[in-house]
Amino acid sequence: MLNQITIHDGERAWQERLSTVFNRISGTMKGRSLSGAKIGVWKILSPNTAPLLEALMASGAEIVAGSSHPNAVSDPTVEYLRQRGAKVFAHNGMSMHDYKSYLAAAVAEKPDYVLSSGAALLLACKEQGWSPRAALEGTRTGTNRLDGEQMAFPIFDWNDSQLKNSIEHRFHVAESFWSAFAYLTGMSLFGRKILVVGFGPVGKGICERARNLGGHVLVADTSALRSAEAVFHGHQVTGLYDGVALADIVVTVTGRDGIIKPEHYAVARQGTVFVNAGHSARELSIDWINRQERSELRNRIDVFTVEGKQLLLLCSGDALNLASGAGPFGTDIWDIFNGLILRGAHWMHSEMPADSKPGVHPYPLHLQEEVARAFLDDRGFQFSAVANSEAGKQ
């Protein structure tokens, strides 16, 4: 399991070798100081997070960090970061009481900037009357939670950035999700019916990879436009009830709470596997599941009973690719997005327009271009903005 592995010099050296795009971006930030800035980081605390926080501290920032997922914390990473001067409020498997206490402690540190996944720290700042100068948000769940909220500071949404939609959502999540599934269950997808609930950018990648791995993919989505697109990808579009009744594996990836309700579990077949790829376990109505007869079948695989049928739940409904205890997967893909976050942090501190208004805004496109160019340069591809400007219009 990941949280039983000690971060040692060899592991960190290997990660450094894979962080080539991030290192390029970090190199361009040398000479730009974050001295005096306190940065609140509320993200997955895995080995993949360490290079980002180390680079921020090397630029002079004070780091206050916690985990956006109680069950997706690498304790060795926490200790590694603490030894390097970060204040970290997290431990793996923390209770909800601990999680809320850690969240309050992070707000009490009064961060100048926030790097957020899921908006928990952003909303906690609002509730406790603290306004950072600016923030980055990187998840659909986070932007959904912020919808309709009157925030007193600017928040830049990189979840909907072109770079994340085209690469991380479609390729990185799919690769890490199904790799974690195979690691945890030992199951292949050949001949199995997989219902993917949500055909947004992440769902699209999960469907594509499942089909390539031999699964028969069904899609349930509330949008006629996305459902029509799913048909052209070769998937079977279905209603949610019918899909759950047919499926061997049900995957939620919507960013919305309560997508799978008790009545959906009632129509599932014996042995159906329920698993979440979204940010929040509440997509699977985890609070309701916790009130059912439930026991651990094997590590991170629970069996719960609904109307006499035994159904399977992976990772207590937390995002499988983050909470499986495997990996980290796709380190060299996530490397790009560590670069994007680092670039955004420096931009907020020294380049953000002084008249930036409160509320949610798109992550700046020119910063995405910088990171994409760093990736192309790193891979040895020749790119000319002039030569490609006309082609891009076609």
Image (cartoon, rainbow, N blue to C red):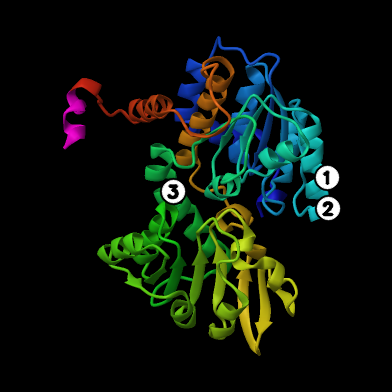
Residue 384 visible in image: no
Identity of the amino acid at label 1?
A: Ser
Q: Is the residue 334 above or below the residue 342 in the image?
A: below
Q: Nearer the viewer, residue 154 or 163?
A: 154
- Counting other residues with Cα less than 10 Å from the Cα at mark 3, is it few (<14), some (14-19), or many (20 or more)? many
Q: CA distance from mark 1 to mark 2?
A: 6 Å
Q: Which residue is mark 3?
A: 169
Residue 264: percent from the left, percent from the top? 55, 78
Q: Residue at x 41, y 55 (%)?
A: 200
Mark 2 or 3 closer to N-term? 2
Q: In this orientation, does residue 21 appear?
A: yes
Amino acid type, residue under disc 2 in the picture: His
Q: Which mark is residue 97?
A: 2
Residue farthest toward the bottom in the current orientation of the protein: 308
- Of mark 3 and mark 1, the one earlier in the sequence is 1
Q: Residue at x 35, y 26 (%)?
A: 373
Contact (Cβ within 8 Å) of mark 2 with mark 3 = no
Instruction: Give the CA separation, mark 2 to mark 3.
Output: 31 Å
- Residue lying farthest top? 31
Q: Is the residue marked by circle 1 packed among few (<14), some (14-19), or many (20+) residues within 10 Å? A: few
Q: Which residue is mark 1?
A: 101
> x and y percent of residue 275 in the render?
56, 66
Please state the extent of the stretch shown in magenta in the rendering: 387-394
- Closer to us: mark 2 or mark 3? 2
- Whether label 1 touches label 2, CB < 8 Å: yes
Depth order, front residue of 39/300: 39
CA distance separating discs 3 and 1 = 31 Å
